[in-house]
Amino acid sequence: MSDSNQMMTFGGHLEVLRRMLLRVLIVTAVFACAIFCFKNTTFDLLLAPSKSDFCLYHWIERFFAWVGYDFHFVPFEVDLIATDLSSQFMTHVSTSIYLGLLCASPYILFELFRFISPALYDNERKYSIPVLLIIYALFIVGVLMSYFILFPISFRFLGTYSVAEQVHSTITLDSYISTFVTLTLVMGVVFQLPVIAYFLAKLGIIDAEMLAKYRQYAFLIIMVVAAIITPPDLMTLVLVTIPLYLLYEVSIFVTKCKIT
C-alpha cells in the first residue's frame, strides 16, 4: 500500500467513494437515457424470446435437420397486455435503468477495482484483475444462457400451457419483464460457483476431495436450487441443472488448481 493511502483520513476515503459513485451514476444514466431513446430496438430485443420465430427454435430445428430428422416447432402466440395506465411507461423507465446498469457494468467493475486496489498488496493486486475478469465473464455467460435458452423455453411452456381450451393466457408486460430480469440476474449470479469454490478453497473451508466425495448430494442440492430459481416446468429445471452441475465439476478442478 502506498504512503498516500496510509495517510488518507476517513473523510478522505468517503470523498473518494462519493466521487466514484457519482461517476458510476453519471455513466449509468447516460447508458439508461440512450437505451430509453431507442425504445423500438430495446423492446424488439427484450420481447424476441416471446415469439415463435426466436433464433433458439431455428437452431434446434437445424440441429434435427443435420442429424436427419424432420422436426419443426408448432407456431404459438401469447399476448402481452398492460393493465395499468402508467405501466408501459414505468416498465420502459425501469427496463432502461436495468439495461443501463448492465451496459455500465464493465465501467462499474473498473471503478470498484480502482477504489479497492490501493488497499491491496502487490501479490493480491496481481491476481485481482484476472479474478474480476473471470467473475464478469461468468456473469455474462449466465445472462446469455438465460436470454437465449432458459427464458424462451420457460415462456413457451408456461405461456402456452392451458388447463382447458376455453382458458387463454394473456401475460402482463410487468410479469414478463420481472420474470425476465429475475431469471437473468439469478443465472448470472449462480454462474459464480467456481469463483466461490476457489475462495472457499483458499480459506481452507473446502477442498477438491471433499467436493468429489459429495457429488451425489451436490447434484440433489443443485436440483433443488434449480427448482427454486426457475419457473415450475421440467424442461427449464433440466436445462438449469445440467450447466450448474457442470459448474460444480469445474469447481472441483478449480480447487485442485488453486493458487497457493
Image (cartoon, grey):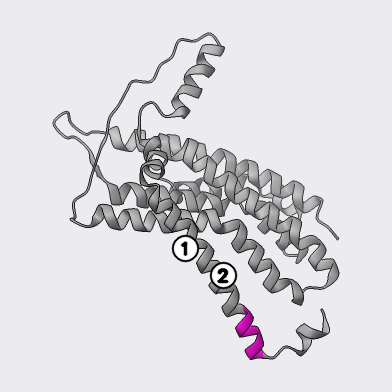
Observer-nearest of 88 and 253: 88
Residue 17 in percent (x, y) is at 60, 78
Q: Amino acid at mark 1?
A: Ala
Q: Is residue 111 left or right of residue 33?
A: right
Residue 71 in percent (x, y) is at 43, 14
- Per the image, is 189 magenta? no
Q: Main secondary structure of the magenta part?
A: helix
**Which mark, residue 23?**
2
Kind of element beneath mark 1:
helix
Residue at figure coordinates x 57%, y 58% from the top left: 105
- Say which residue label 1 marks: 29
Q: Which residues are magenta?
A: 10-16
Residue at figure coordinates x 79%, y 85% from the top left: 4
Q: Amino acid at mark 2?
A: Arg
Residue at figure coordinates x 72%, y 88% from the top left: 8
Local packing at callout 2 (Cα closer than 10 Å; few below 14, some 14-19, many 20+) is some
Residue 192 in percent (x, y) is at 62, 54
Tell me the distance, in whole angstroms, between the alpha carbons under discs 1 and 2: 10 Å
